[in-house]
Every structure is written in structure tokens, then in C-alpha cells.
């Protein structure tokens, strides 16, 4: 197996998932989502799609449910693109908390600087 194949496949999937979410998905619960990364397992059988979005906690929960329910549709759309893979990985969507964590650290540092 090619050593960086999971990373290259992750980048390809990221681009295509962004296109599908912005142009082919018509679920109002999804809203404006940013796909940060697609981490593909070394055996290429599964992929975790990390995303962020702005909105209330309720809106984030609704978007998570919508993405979970539409993962089959997104996977089917990816199959129709004739990507150069033998088997398309199963998709799991996870909210990326790294931006929230970075924001909390930034707020703590600002408070310390003001003190």
C-alpha cells in the first residue's frame, strides 16, 4: 500500500464532501458547515469527517443528527463520482472541538493579561 494513501484520500474526500454539502444537500438543519479534516484509517475502510459550524448548541445538535442521517446519501454521491478507490470508506461525522478549545484558551490568556 502507498504510505500516504490515507492522507491523499482524506484530502480528496474533504473536497468532494464540501461540494456535496454546499450544492447537493438541501437539509435546512445542516446550515453552514466547514469541513476541517477527513481522517482516513490506514486500512482505508473508515473515515472520520471533522466539521465545525456556528450556531447555538441546539443548532449544532440538529446538524449532527442531519449529518448522521445523511451519511449514506453522501457516501452514495461520492460513489457516483467514480473516485479512484476500490471500496469507499464508511463516513462518521464528528464535531471538531479544537476551535472551541482554542477560543477558551485565548479567553483565559486575555483575562490573565488584563489582571
Image (cartoon, rainbow, N blue to C red):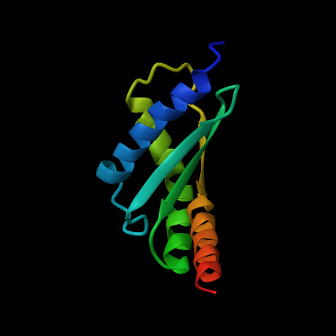
Give the residue at the far bottom of this rendering: 115
Residue 109: image quadrant is bottom right
The number of discs equals: 0
For residue 81, side relative to residue 62 (left or right): left
Give the residue at the far top of this rendering: 1
Q: Residue at x 57, y 69 (%)?
A: 103
Image: 59 above or below 50: below
Image: 15 above or below 73: above
Q: Residue at x 55, y 64 (%)?
A: 64
Quadrant containing the N terminus is: top right
For residue 81, side relative to residue 84 (left or right): left
For residue 24, side relative to residue 44 (left or right): left
In percent of width and height, residue 115 lies at: 64, 87
Q: Residue at x 42, y 64 (%)?
A: 30
Image: 63 above or below 3: below
Residue 89: image quadrant is top right
In percent of width and height, residue 90 lies at: 61, 39
Q: Residue at x 53, y 44 (%)?
A: 37
In percent of width and height, residue 93 lies at: 58, 52
In percent of width and height, residue 25 lies at: 36, 54
Give the residue at the far left of this rendering: 23
Amino acid at each position: 500500500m502507498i504510505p500516504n494513501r490515507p492522507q491523499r484520500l482524506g484530502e480528496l474526500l474533504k473536497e468532494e464532501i464540501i461540494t456535496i454539502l454546499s450544492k447537493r444537500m438541501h437539509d435546512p438543519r445542516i446550515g453552514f458547515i466547514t469541513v476541517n479534516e477527513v481522517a482516513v484509517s490506514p486500512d482505508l475502510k473508515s473515515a472520520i469527517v471533522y466539521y465545525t459550524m456556528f450556531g447555538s448548541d441546539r443548532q449544532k445538535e440538529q446538524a449532527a443528527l442531519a449529518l448522521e442521517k445523511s451519511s449514506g446519501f453522501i457516501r452514495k454521491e461520492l460513489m457516483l463520482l467514480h473516485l479512484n478507490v476500490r471500496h469507499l470508506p464508511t463516513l462518521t461525522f464528528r464535531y471538531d472541538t479544537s476551535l472551541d478549545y482554542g477560543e477558551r484558551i485565548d479567553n483565559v490568556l486575555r483575562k490573565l493579561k488584563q489582571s
